Image: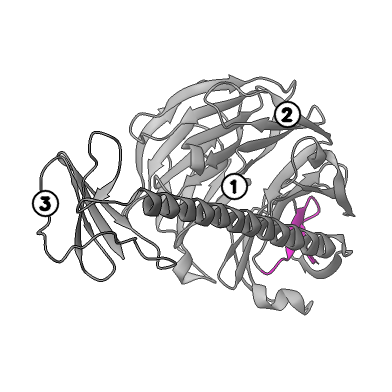
Amino acid sequence: PSIVMRSGSALVLCAALTLFAYPVCGDTTDEAPHNGDDGFVGVASDGTTLLIQPPSNGRVLVDGVNCKDEVAALKAQNAVLRSELKESIQASSVELAEARASIAVLQRVVCDAEPRLVSSFVSHTDVVRAIVQYGNYLITASGETDDSVKVWELSAAWSGSETMLASFKPHGDDFTALIIHEDRFYTGSTDGKIQVWNALSLPFPVPALFTLNNHTGSVHSLAISAEQQLLFSGSFAGSILVWNVSGPERPRLIQTLTGHSGSVTCLEVAADLGRLYSGSTDDDIRAWDISNPTSITLLHTIDQHVDAITAMAVQPGFNRLFSGSIDGQIMAFDIGSSGSPSVIQLLSGTALSMFISPTNMLYVGTADNEINVYDASLPIPRIASLVRSIATTTPVHALLVTPAKVLFAGEDDGSVNGYTPAC
């Protein structure tokens, strides 16, 4: 049943639980309800209209009959119900925590399984710098003397029968970067150009839709802000160009960011925070506020590394930034606040590539011919505990974990190897 009370000009609607009926006191059949501003009007479970009028002596009357005991009993029942509800919520919270712990244990069991090599894509002749997935296609790109993009049938990765569907050279110089966004993918090169390709035309998307040649030097890194529909391109000259890629037309240059004194080697977007992080050979990481796409500003500079930045990864939901450098240090930063962050974790190794899986496992490809795996879902400092290390033949420059839990690693010798299970 429900009860409506009016006191002065305030009107309150309360829903009484069906576990007990609202107490009805006195005879309500012979007296019309009082609607004065100094009283309360109530409706009992049988539809009877009640007048609850507190007199000056503090007693509660319903049509002139003292209902103080009944109201006290109702309050007591409400208190019991609130207590039971609180206990139920607490029990549900415990059950939820136990379920999450069980899932974590199951994930750990999968992670503890020794990964096995299930695919080896051997066609590139030089360092593999990028690996991306688009539907059933795996796209790999290499630089140095190869400078080719190759398209593979991803479904074949489980059987060991690798099928290359297409191979093309998008640039006339050293390939440096590849990123995919919606139905387009973008490539960068030391020729200073960015090529825009139609992913819907895969496996053979040539010719390019557009060629962007606004950079005055080599393009070394690319990143996408899906929410802002922005493409960022970092150059050898230290500048970062910002492009509007919101429509089907040619991407439009809207801003140039400057400040780095060295080549911009890494770009990462922290979508939850509306920020762009740029790493450079000047040893610094810069944080940019991209919440206003037409007026991007520098927030702060992180200067904890003592040598060139070689890899970065942002962990969504945890507000963490991981960075690798030639100085042999892998650093973790808490980037949740607006100020310049301090190092919250130190790992060792010269990282050339990083990837954070949907299950918050941090994969680090190193110059020491290995892939190190850390559980980034753990609190600091437990993340420093190495889950496993996968030996490779040569340094690892590119990493990807697919939704099917296959880890792909692009190596210095041009090979792309797939391992499962990946976490």
* C-alpha span from label 1 to label 3: 79 Å
Q: Residues within 10 Å of mark 2 (few under 14, many from 20)?
A: few
Task: Specify start and end residues of the magenta stretch as a single range.
Answer: 404-423
Q: Quadrant of the N terminus?
A: bottom left
Q: Nearer the viewer, residue 271 or 7?
A: 7
Q: Dot 1 corresponds to which residue? A: 177
* Magenta stretch contains residue 410: yes
Q: Can residue 184 be seen in this view?
A: yes
Q: Dot 3 corresponds to which residue? A: 34
Q: Earlier in the sequence, mark 1 or mark 3?
A: 3
Q: Which amino acid does label 2 sit on?
A: Ile
SS class, disc 3:
loop
Q: Nearer the observer, disc 2 or disc 1?
A: 2
Which residue is at 65% across, 22% downward?
282
Q: Are marks 1 and 3 in contact (CB under 8 Å)?
A: no
Q: Which of 271 and 257 is in front in this view?
A: 271
Give the label on residue 166, or none: none
Where is residue 200 drawn, in percent x and y?
Answer: 45, 69
Q: What residue type is labelled 1?
A: Ala
Where is residue 379 drawn, in percent x and y?
Answer: 74, 40
* C-alpha span from label 2 to label 3: 67 Å
Where is residue 121 drawn, in percent x and y?
Answer: 76, 67
Q: Dot 2 corresponds to which residue? A: 344
Q: Which of marks 2 and 1 is nearer the N terminus?
A: 1
Where is residue 308 drawn, in percent x and y?
Answer: 71, 27
In the rendered structure, the answer to whether residue 55 lies left or right of residue 35 reads: right
Q: Quadrant of the C terminus?
A: bottom right
Q: Nearer the observer, disc 2 or disc 3?
A: 3
From this view, report whether residue 415 is shown above or below residue 202: above
Which residue is at 37% across, 32% downward?
255
Q: Is residue 394 visible?
A: no
* C-alpha span from label 2 to label 1: 29 Å
